[in-house]
Amino acid sequence: MASHGKRPPLARMSPGDGVLIYSPTTTHPHGEPLRAVTIVGEVTGDEPEPSDVIPHGFRRAASLREIEPLPLEDIREHLPLSRIRFGFFELDAANAAAIWTLVEHQGR
């Protein structure tokens, strides 16, 4: 689910697209500040499908995995920070590749 289950952002995605999930806090809605990417993955579903969690909402199937939190400070030069609060946006290829490289080298 992205953007609170709105269908249009999910419909713009394609199978194989990468997914980064940013967590502003440790738990929703009142956890401790975290400000990190905590989940990564890849879209696997062909189309948005109705959500059983949000009435009239949609979700998109994806293969996701938790990662060691990747702090915002480490990736801020690759993110349009003004857009993070909107919940869903596309990264250009160069910035996406730079963040994926940091994810892959984490913990080494």
Image (cartoon, grey):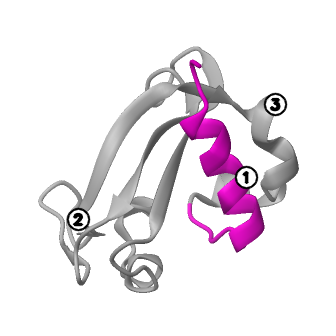
Q: Residue at x 69, y 71 (%)?
A: 93
Residue 58 in the image: x percent, y percent?
26, 71
In magenta stretch: residue 102: yes
Question: Residue 6 is drawn in which quadrant?
Answer: bottom left
Which residue type carries mark 2? Ala
Q: Residue at x 35, y 66 (%)?
A: 5
Q: Residues within 10 Å of mark 3 (few under 14, many from 20)?
A: few
Work out whether mark 2 precedes mark 1 in sequence or the reverse, and give the earlier one.
2
Q: Residue furthest top?
A: 32
Q: CA distance from mark 2 to mark 1?
A: 24 Å
Magenta span: 88-108
Q: Nearer the viewer, mark 2 or mark 1?
A: 1
Work out whether mark 2 precedes mark 3 in sequence or the reverse, and give the earlier one.
2
Q: Nearer the viewer, mark 1 or mark 3?
A: 1
Residue behind mark 1: 98
Provide the secondary structure element on which disc 3 rests. helix
Question: Residue 87 is drawn in which quadrant?
Answer: bottom right
